């Protein structure tokens, strides 16, 4: 792009510069940190690897027609989960569709590319907004736009929560919508931008809307408009937002009702961080989970701090933006306003998710400082003194490490040096020429020969003009050189500190969070094994107990119990927990349950068995091939001879024993639950715990000598029965001893956020004496009734009976299940699908009614006349959201029509007056 183009299109140039800097820094930082895809270290930390990458993989399958399910139901996860709320939470951004352009085995790279693109677009949008708010240097807008895109919140929080980046883009766009409402222009486009922002990610769009509203109110105050015109503009903005949110309602309402039916998780209470930690996050290369990442770059911070002292800016501008920044900062630390920012619910995880709004306000304040000219020495000195005070207070924070200071000092030197050169470049601008021939005076009117001597050579006045022109050219070159050096220094300082900040955050996240391996040979072998074994919907294929991530079915295929979402249904989590399953993330990350009875209940006919994921640092000796075991199971729809289900057969009807709860769903007694004798490592009786951790206390060994003497569990089981151990609050390994058959090692993990799943340990010996050796890794408990002895012959008999009376054919589409039943079926048809909200069923030709529940599963009463059952799913809130969206669309069309008619009439009246004039 040449110089004339840059002068003609400053906003486009600024946007491109911001995007280019953002991409450069983002990729350079990952290269420095040796993070994927530029190094061996994974970037799939926490929910990025556990949720977001798997959901994008499922979207890839959906777009390529390879998924089990559609927009309504995800049949791969949670034995059938509602997908539209997940789509609206994780995948509704238009950028998410780009993953379809990548190979399936490069899904991690696809998500990374989408993340980089979103961040770059946020910088471009902010650069565009800055030049719309006030004219100025395009390159300065580009640098500050990049500062916003590379703010601490973006680099440390949103980079591994890519759906939040849509809010980073939405905020400057919504501020642009506010500018249009001030001018009374582009209402339809404004409504569409609001709708798109709320569709892309309603959570951060809510915060961005609040932030844009604050900016609009300040702009109204600064504009000096009469009260009536100001109220009119505010009303236009409110209508624009209401119509935009209304258009997004079909998705927003589904997500809202999905949260109402989700497992509650943990209730948290907000506690503001210490002042030194708050100020520390303004500095580069600081990191602390749960603290507001306020870093926007030293240059932007210095300019924002200089605004109150910049005399070239009007007092109202200085006071308005400075007070707004201060007010939003304080609102992040006060509980009532904190709740308002987060939709009146303190989130699980980082409690400062609105920080990007404050970062935007700092950047906008910095822009207003620079747009009124480079601040003078006093203003810069005052800003530097404030920065020094911030650094001094922040030095007491544990978030500031030794490497922060050289990065900060270099950034300050670059920022001050750049501003000084820029100030000199402005000072080098020549004053308007004066004296003879300088303007329109007499010398200018003397004609072509004026200023020349007798022989046509330059006279005194001509030589002075030429000398002035030469001096002006030299001054222009000097000014250009100084400005170029200033830009290079400012850009270099920004590139360096932002790269350092991002690289430090990337490395420190690996030390503080769980991390997961990107797609590799392990997942490829699993996917191939599942593809060969898959028989859906005749039976399910579970990806296996040894998971790679919390959403393995979406990553490698199959139809399992594993499911991790913020919207994991309460009924599903409680049902699987009652059956002995384990979970993490306080009940929202339900795991696979490797159990023969639950496999029969949920029609799991094939199960993948993989070695432990070595990325999770299990014993390297625990390696082996990926295998598949098969089991004869009933169909997806079975018939139980019980009476019509009632509320008493819901999840609340389960008892404390998972073995007895499995038998309730199976309909047959298949377990022996023997009394236990638990002993500590020294042979004594363990202490007892009460409450939800009731049972024998198993303490972790404190010395190597103590570790040699392991706690044990003794019981008696029928010879040949399969031995299971259920110890949800135990952490460590368990191994069956004294049996000729090769025992299995059960791995149990539990803490305040997770419980362990029931596991099979092997076969009871001919003597029936079962001895289980425990190797605890932390103090936990073993409950009464922890051991279950499964009679496999009884289980086979129960399966055959259910197959005989079950459905002869089952077809499954996106949100519909249809089963053909034997003639004369009476009792209750049970679908091996959690009874989440939204299911409606009908037997035969009867009208559809809300599905009933059979111990947490879908149930349909049968009277003997129906030979088929049909169940359909519609997520709660979809009908309401569609109605609201329709009304909003109709209102927008009517307003557009009225505006167009008024415009034509207004244009027609002057024409009539002109035609009627004499």
Image: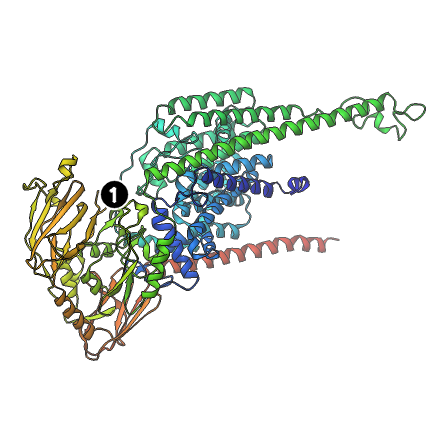
Q: Which residue is mark 1?
A: 267
The residue under the point 74% across, 26% down is 472
- Residue 917 in view, yes or no: yes
Q: Quadrant of residue 342?
A: top left
Q: Looking at the picture, how far across and down is residue 895, in whole percent? A: 51, 55
Q: Looking at the picture, how far across and down is residue 534, in whole percent? A: 32, 66
- Residue 643 in view, yes or no: no
The residue under the point 17% across, 46% down is 729
The residue under the point 19% across, 76% down is 825
**192 versus 446 height, above or below:** below
Report whether 770 appears left or right of 176: left
Residue at far front of view: 740
Decide: few, some or many residues near mark 1? Use Cα within 10 Å; few <14, some 14-19, many ≥20.
few
Q: Looking at the picture, how far across and down is residue 527, in whole percent? A: 35, 59
Q: Looking at the picture, how far across and down is residue 60, in whole percent? A: 42, 58
Q: Quadrant of residue 671?
A: bottom left
Residue at far right of view: 455
Coloration of the structure image: rainbow
**38 versus 528 height, above or below:** above
The residue under the point 37% across, 31% down is 330
Report whether 824 appears left or right of 177: left
Depth check: give the residue in front, 252 or 356: 356
**314 versus 15 height, above or below:** above
Depth check: give the residue in front, 438 or 666: 666
Label 1, secondary structure: give it: loop
Report whether 711 appears left or right of 622: left
């Amino acid at each position: 792009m040449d110089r004339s183009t840059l002068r003609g299109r400053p906003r486009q140039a600024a946007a491109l510069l911001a995007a280019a800097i953002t991409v450069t820094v983002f990729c350079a930082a990952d290269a420095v940190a040796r993070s994927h895809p530029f190094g061996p270290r994974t970037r799939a930390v926490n929910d990025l690897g556990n949720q977001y990458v798997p959901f994008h993989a499922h979207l890839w399958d959906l777009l390529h027609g390879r998924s089990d399910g559609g927009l309504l139901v995800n049949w791969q996860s949670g034995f059938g989960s509602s997908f539209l709320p997940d789509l609206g939470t994780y995948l509704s951004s238009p950028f998410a569709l780009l993953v379809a352009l990548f190979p399936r085995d490069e899904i991690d790279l696809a998500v990374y590319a989408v993340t980089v693109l979103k961040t770059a677009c946020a910088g471009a949008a902010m650069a565009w907004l800055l030049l719309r708010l006030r004219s100025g240097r395009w390159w300065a807008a580009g640098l500050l736009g990049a500062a916003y895109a590379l703010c601490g919140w973006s680099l440390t929080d949103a980079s591994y929560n890519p759906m939040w980046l849509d809010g980073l883009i939405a905020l400057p766009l919504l501020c642009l919508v506010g500018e249009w409402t001030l001018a009374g222009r582009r209402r339809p486009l404004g409504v569409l931008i609001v709708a798109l922002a709320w569709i892309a990610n309603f959570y951060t769009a809510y915060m961005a809307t609040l932030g844009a509203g604050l900016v609009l109110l300040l702009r109204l105050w600064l504009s000096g408009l009469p009260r009536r015109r100001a109220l009119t503009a505010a009303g236009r903005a409110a209508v624009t937002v209401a119509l935009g949110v209304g258009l997004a309602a079909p998705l927003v309402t589904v997500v809202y009702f999905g949260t109402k039916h989700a497992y509650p998780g943990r209730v948290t209470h907000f506690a503001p961080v210490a002042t030194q930690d708050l100020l520390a996050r303004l500095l580069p290369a600081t990191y602390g989970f749960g603290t507001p990442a306020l870093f926007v770059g030293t240059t932007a911070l210095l300019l924002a701090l200089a605004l109150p002292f910049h005399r070239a800016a009007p007092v109202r501008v200085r006071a308005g933006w400075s007070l707004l920044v201060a007010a939003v900062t304080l609102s992040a630390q006060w509980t009532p306003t904190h709740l308002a920012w987060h939709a009146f619910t303190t989130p699980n995880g980082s409690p400062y998710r609105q920080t990007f709004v404050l970062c935007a306000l700092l950047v906008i304040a910095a822009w207003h400082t620079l747009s009124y000219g480079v601040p003078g020495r006093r203003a810069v000195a005052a800003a530097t003194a404030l920065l020094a005070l911030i650094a001094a207070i922040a030095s007491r924070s544990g978030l500031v490490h030794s490497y922060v200071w050289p990065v900060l000092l270099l950034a300050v030197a670059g920022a001050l040096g750049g501003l000084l050169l820029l100030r000199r470049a402005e000072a080098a601008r020549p004053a308007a020429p004066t004296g003879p021939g300088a303007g329109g005076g007499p010398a200018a009117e003397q004609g072509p020969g004026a200023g020349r001597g007798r022989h046509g050579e330059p006279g005194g006045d001509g030589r002075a003009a030429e000398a002035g022109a030469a001096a002006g050219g030299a001054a222009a070159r000097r000014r250009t050189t100084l400005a170029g050096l200033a830009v290079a220094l400012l850009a270099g300082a920004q590139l360096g500190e932002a790269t350092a900040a991002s690289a430090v955050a990337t490395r420190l996240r690996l030390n503080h969070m769980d991390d997961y391996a990107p797609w590799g040979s392990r997942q490829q072998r699993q996917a191939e094994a599942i593809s060969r074994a898959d028989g859906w919907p005749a039976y399910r294929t579970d990806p296996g107990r040894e998971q790679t991530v919390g959403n393995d079915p979406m990553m490698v295929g199959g139809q399992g119990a594993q499911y991790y979402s913020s919207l994991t249904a309460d009924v599903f989590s409680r049902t699987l927990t009652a059956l002995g399953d384990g979970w993490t993330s306080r009940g929202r990350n339900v795991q696979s349950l490797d159990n023969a009875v639950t496999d029969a209940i949920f029609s799991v006919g094939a199960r993948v068995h993989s070695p432990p994921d070595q990325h999770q640092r299990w014993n390297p000796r625990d390696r082996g091939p990926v295998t598949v075991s098969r089991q004869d199971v009933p169909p997806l729809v079975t018939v139980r001879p019980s009476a019509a289900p009632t509320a008493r057969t819901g999840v609340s009807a389960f008892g404390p024993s998972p073995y007895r709860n499995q038998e309730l769903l199976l309909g047959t007694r298949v377990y022996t639950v023997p009394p236990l004798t638990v002993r500590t490592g020294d042979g004594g009786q363990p202490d007892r715990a009460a409450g939800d951790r009731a049972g024998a206390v198993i303490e972790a060994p404190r010395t190597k000598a103590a570790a040699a003497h392991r706690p044990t569990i003794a019981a008696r089981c029928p010879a040949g029965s399969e031995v299971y151990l259920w110890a949800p609050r135990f952490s460590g390994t368990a191994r069956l001893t004294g049996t000729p058959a090769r025992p299995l090692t059960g791995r149990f993990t539990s803490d305040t956020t997770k419980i362990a799943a029931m596991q099979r340990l092997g076969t009871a010996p001919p003597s029936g004496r079962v001895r289980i050796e425990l190797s605890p890794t932390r103090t936990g408990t073993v409950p009464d009734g922890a051991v279950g002895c499964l009679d496999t012959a009884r289980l086979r008999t129960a399966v055959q009976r259910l197959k005989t009376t079950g459905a002869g054919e089952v077809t499954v589409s996106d949100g519909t299940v249809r089963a053909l039943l034997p003639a004369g079926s009476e009792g209750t048809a049970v679908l091996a699908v959690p009874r989440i909200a939204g299911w409606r069923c009908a037997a035969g030709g009867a009208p559809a009614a809300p599905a009933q529940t059979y111990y947490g599963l879908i149930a349909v009463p049968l009277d003997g006349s129906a030979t088929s059952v049909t169940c359909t799913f519609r997520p709660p809130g979809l009908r309401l959201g569609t109605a609201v969206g329709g009304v909003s669309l109709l209102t927008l069309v009517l307003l557009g029509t009225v505006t167009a008619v008024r415009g034509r009439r207004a244009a027609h009246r002057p024409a009539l007056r002109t035609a009627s004039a004499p």
